[in-house]
Image: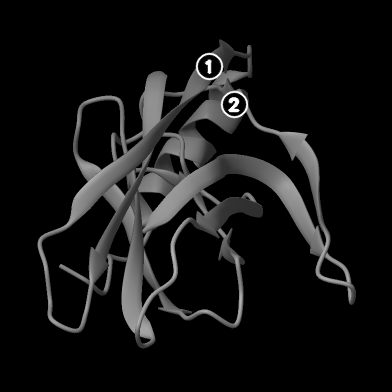
Amino acid sequence: MLKLLVYAPCEKVILATDQTVSLISIMESVRVNVAVNLPADALAPIQWSILSLWKRDEEIPEPIEMEERSEIFRPDGTLAIREVSKITVSNDHVFYTTVLQVPIFPIGLPGFVKVKCHTRRMNPETEWAEFAEFPLFVVHQPVEVNEETRQAIEAAIIALPEKADK
């Protein structure tokens, strides 16, 4: 019923008033300057977006409620971020666009972060089906710092408050 045309993590998505979409800088990798070992679950305040562009490829008798789930997995396979968007599919439109704006990025481990797209129908509810996977490569760039700065960085990391979701 819906065909995924584009699933792209990018720096920014611009939706114009005429419903056209512009992608700014499709992401391939994130480079992080690292002076000390980071915790595996470290997140950086990096603003980025995920664009999904869908096409309805058949007429439907009545509107269908859908959910699209974007999941971001660290290189070790653990889930870092999960967000769900709702889509109402009807014969009124052929194309459907979702934009997820993400304020953080998992930087704790070098390697491939996987961004995955799943959907499911809500009326009646069906199982999640995976539609796309987009790898983003996290590179840790070692930087030299003096001992005093290194100790201050390590103290700041230790002093970070526990996550609210634990």
| Residue designated by label 2 | 32
Number of callouts:
2
Q: Residue at x 60, y 31 (%)?
A: 149
Q: Looking at the picture, how far across and down is residue 22, in whole percent?
A: 83, 51
Q: Looking at the picture, how far across and down is residue 83, in whole percent?
A: 37, 65
**Placement of 156 over or under 137, stated as above or below:** below
Determine crowd level at label 2: few under 14, some 14-19, many 20+ residues with C-alpha closer than 10 A.
some
**Placement of 14 over or under 43, stated as above or below:** below
Nearer-the-camera pick, 55 or 57: 57
Residue 14 lies left or right of residue 49; in this view the side is right
Q: CA distance from mark 2 to mark 1?
A: 6 Å
Going by the numbered disc 1, the residue's amino acid type is Val
Q: Residue at x 47, y 46 (%)?
A: 4
Going by the numbered disc 2, the residue's amino acid type is Val
For residue 149, say whether it is visible: yes
Dot 1: element = strand
Dot 2: element = strand
**Placement of 64 over or under 27, stated as above or below:** below
Nearer-the-camera pick, 144 or 1: 1
Q: Looking at the picture, how far across and down is residue 72, in whole percent?
A: 36, 45
Looking at the image, tell me whether mark 2 or mark 1 is earlier in sequence order.
2
| Residue designated by label 1 | 139
Q: Residue at x 28, y 34 (%)?
A: 40
Residue farthest to the bottom?
62
Determine crowd level at label 1: few under 14, some 14-19, many 20+ residues with C-alpha closer than 10 A.
some
Nearer-the-camera pick, 101 or 75: 101
For residue 156, say whether it is visible: no
Numbered label attached to residue 97: none
Q: Looking at the picture, how far across and down is residue 56, in whole percent?
A: 49, 61
Quadrant occupied by the C terminus: bottom left
Q: Are marks 2 and 1 in contact (CB under 8 Å)?
A: yes
**Placement of 141 over or under 64, stated as above or below:** above
